[in-house]
Image: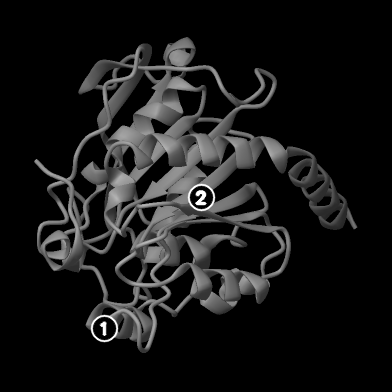
């Protein structure tokens, strides 16, 4: 296993460096299955629960592995059960849910319930994937959010997508009121000139859901490497200015497009996300209250 960079990174995207094993207990069930609410395609997911939350999963769940995760920053308050739906990079370019396992473990060790989704056509999920993420992938993400809400009983759900997964999550951001925030890891906006074929390809393929994302008033965090292979910090910042507030762009110095699923940037992005969720908590609560009032009218 080795960190991926450049063209070799694209060809071997599935060969990432895993995060170091965390130190606090969590559980993971890799055998979760549920039907997509779009067309009943069977979707697979790994569900991570914090160590203090073992009783939340049914005793007849199988395939539960024990592992560990650590640190104590920015965990969710005990009165608020929060979930994270994670979505991986493009299956057609080697993206797979396994690349998100270390990040999922880190989040579970900090008190979050995590659904690490395998998009249709990837991992153990049935169906087939599309080039632009416009053939059921958004509905798959929404289904995973519903699982967080209805089965894991999470009050709020945060979206976290990596690369292509970030574009798909952008299409789901306003599909449910309980979806609280959005975190994009290496959003592949593309660039016509500075990133060669990678930039042009991303420009053509990865914009199906940008209008929905730009119009959403939910908090948005963009994590972008300073040497990303598909886009630039400048392009990300310009896109952020066209998005409804609140929105934050956080550069990761020395990180390319593939480095976010490798040490040390994977640990740093987890801290960035938890800090963002903590900083936007008041805004999210107020927005949730406004949505509840609107529904009652």
Can residue 5 be spotted in the picture? Answer: yes
Residue under numbered circle 1: 196
Which quadrant holds residue 197?
bottom left
Task: Work out whether residue 260 or residue 245 is closer to the camera in this orientation and state it.
Answer: 260
Residue under numbered circle 2: 159
Residue sitting at 43 percent across and 67 percent down? 167
Element under disc 2: strand
- Mark 1 vs mark 2, CA separation in Å: 30 Å
Task: Work out whether residue 210 or residue 45 is closer to the camera in this orientation and state it.
Answer: 210
Q: Position of residue 61 (x, y in %)?
A: 29, 22
Element under disc 1: helix
**Number of residues whose C-alpha sits closer than 10 Å to that of mark 1, classed few (under 14), some (14–19) or many (20 or more):** some
Q: Position of residue 203 (x, y in %)?
A: 38, 83
Can residue 38 be spotted in the picture? Answer: no
Mark 1 vs mark 2: in front? 1
Q: Quadrant of the C terminus?
A: bottom right
Which quadrant holds residue 47?
top left
Q: Quadrant of the N terminus?
A: top left
Q: Position of residue 294 (x, y in %)?
A: 85, 57
Direction from residue 12 to residue 184 in the image, left or right: right
Direction from residue 101 to residue 7 in the image, left or right: left
**Number of residues whose C-alpha sits closer than 10 Å to that of mark 2, classed few (under 14), some (14–19) or many (20 or more):** many
Q: Is residue 85 above or below residue 130?
A: above
Direction from residue 263 to residue 276 in the image, left or right: right
Task: Work out whether residue 151 or residue 135 is closer to the camera in this orientation and state it.
Answer: 135
């Amino acid at each position: 296993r080795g960190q991926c960079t450049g063209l070799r990174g694209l060809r071997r995207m599935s060969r990432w460096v895993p995060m170091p094993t965390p130190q606090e207990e969590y559980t993971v069930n890799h055998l979760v299955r549920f039907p997509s609410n779009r067309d009943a395609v069977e979707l697979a997911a790994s569900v991570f629960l914090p160590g203090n939350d073992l009783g939340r999963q049914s005793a007849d769940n199988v395939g539960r592995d024990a592992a560990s995760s650590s640190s104590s920053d920015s965990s969710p308050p005990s009165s608020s059960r929060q979930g994270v739906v994670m979505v991986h990079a493009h299956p057609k370019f080697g993206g797979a849910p396994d690349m998100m396992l270390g990040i999922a473990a880190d989040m579970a060790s900090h008190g979050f319930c995590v659904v690490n989704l395998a998009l249709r056509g990837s991992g153990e999920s049935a169906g087939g994937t599309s080039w632009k993420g416009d053939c059921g992938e958004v509905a798959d993400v929404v289904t995973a959010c519903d699982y967080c809400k209805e089965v894991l009983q999470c009050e709020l759900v945060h979206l976290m997508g990596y690369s292509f997964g970030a574009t798909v999550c952008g299409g789901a951001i306003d599909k449910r009121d309980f979806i609280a925030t959005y975190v994009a890891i290496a959003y592949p906006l593309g660039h016509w000139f500075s990133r060669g074929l990678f930039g042009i390809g991303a420009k053509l393929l990865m914009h199906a859901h940008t209008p929905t994302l730009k119009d959403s008033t939910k908090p948005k965090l963009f994590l972008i490497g300073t040497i990303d292979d598909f886009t630039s910090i400048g392009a990300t910042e310009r896109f952020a200015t066209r998005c409804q507030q609140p929105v934050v762009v956080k550069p990761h110095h020395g990180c390319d497009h593939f480095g976010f699923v490798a040490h040390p940037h994977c640990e740093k992005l987890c801290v960035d996300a938890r800090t963002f969720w903590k900083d936007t908590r008041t805004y999210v609560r107020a927005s949730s209250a406004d949505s509840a009032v609107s529904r009652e009218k």
